[in-house]
Image: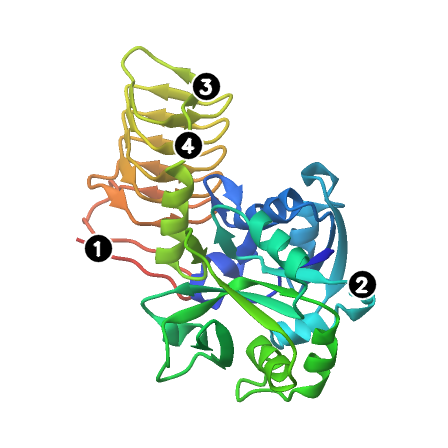
Amino acid sequence: MKALILSGGKGTRLRPITHTGAKQLIPVGNKPILFYGVEAIRDAGITDVGIVVGDTEPEIRAALGDGSALGIKTTYIRQEAPLGLAHAVKVSRDFMRDDSFVMYLGDNLILDGITPLVREFERDRPNSQILLAHVPNPQDFGVAELDGSRVKRLTEKPKEPKSDLALVGVYMFDSNIFEAVNKIKPSFRNELEITDAIQWLIDHDKNVNCHIISGWWKDTGKLEDMLEANRMVLSRAKRLLRGTLDGTTRTEGEVIVGAGTTIENSILRGPLIVGERCVIKNSYIGPFTSIYDEVTIRNSEIEHSIVLERCVIQDIPVRIEASLIGKEVRIQRSQLKPTAYRFMVGDSSLVDVL
């Protein structure tokens, strides 16, 4: 088998972070989301991996390279525009040839991996196997209607869902999918929908199996989903202190501190991770926080948040929480008079003030 990881898309729901970076490279537990998918595929024994890329191709290439560091071999496949998941399959035909493959959306995270699901597909040899999960908001996903255990109909983001079973962002196909993606027409969104392609398989008497997953899964396309993914990853953290912590610093629970980091007179309450070469002084870092490399935090409190590299947070009088803070951001308390809020904020930002 081969694999296809989709790493295009504009990440509009995570702007302004994604104005300057690929959403698949936002770190969860200080590791890019994309890498969790790559590792799940590798752990399932699949090493020949096509990476579908768009405008953020240079960043994706810089992060993954030839894949050898992660135990895979990468082939980059250019999608000229985000024209739908089925279009991504269509442009991958030369890479896939007639092989069966796993398609994995690069911003999805399945905490327990996909190895048993791949084995099931290899054993039963259906034309397609889809993964489903019960969700509270099915109108935001592709939705499946079942007749017993048989997939009857798939609908993309229905206004009135017929079930709460959402398509998880991992699919398995044999070569019949290429006929399907060439037969379907663009949707009202002007995209070739993978739900329409799978429905074509169903309508033409192909064998489409489904597996309802019980483990944790998340599409990390929105801030609250990203923070929940970070929380779930950190819930499995194991204590590891590589940096330098002074005698007045207190750690509680599962705390990870990277090499070259110095922490003074602070409280670290896990689970949390602090990256390499950070400086934390007179501060509180609370549970479910991921702080990436070369971040400075002084006289501040933060929890349940993700902080990207080279940020500075200092002298903030109230606790920061439930936040995603981009690269090289500076958050500080102004000493200037007259007293006022002062912002330099990009497009699609959110600022809550007291």
Crowd around label 1: few <14 · some 14–19 · many ≥20 (10 Å): few
Image coordinates of residue 236 in percent, x first then y, are 41, 35
Per the image, the residue denoted by label 4 is 237
Q: Amino acid at mark 3?
A: Gly
Crowd around label 2: few <14 · some 14–19 · many ≥20 (10 Å): some
Per the image, the residue denoted by label 3 is 243
Q: Quadrant of residue 79?
A: bottom right
Q: Secondary structure at mark 4?
A: loop
Distance from Cα at disc 1 to Cα at disc 4: 32 Å
Q: Earlier in the sequence, mark 2 or mark 3?
A: 2
Residue in the image at 66% along x and 56% along y? 123
Q: Earlier in the sequence, mark 2 or mark 4?
A: 2
Distance from Cα at disc 2 to Cα at disc 3: 44 Å
Residue in the image at 65% along x and 78% along y? 206
Distance from Cα at disc 2 to Cα at disc 1: 50 Å
Q: Earlier in the sequence, mark 3 or mark 1?
A: 3
Per the image, the residue denoted by label 2 is 95
Q: Amino acid at mark 4?
A: Ala
Per the image, the residue denoted by label 1 is 353
Image coordinates of residue 53 in percent, x first then y, are 68, 62
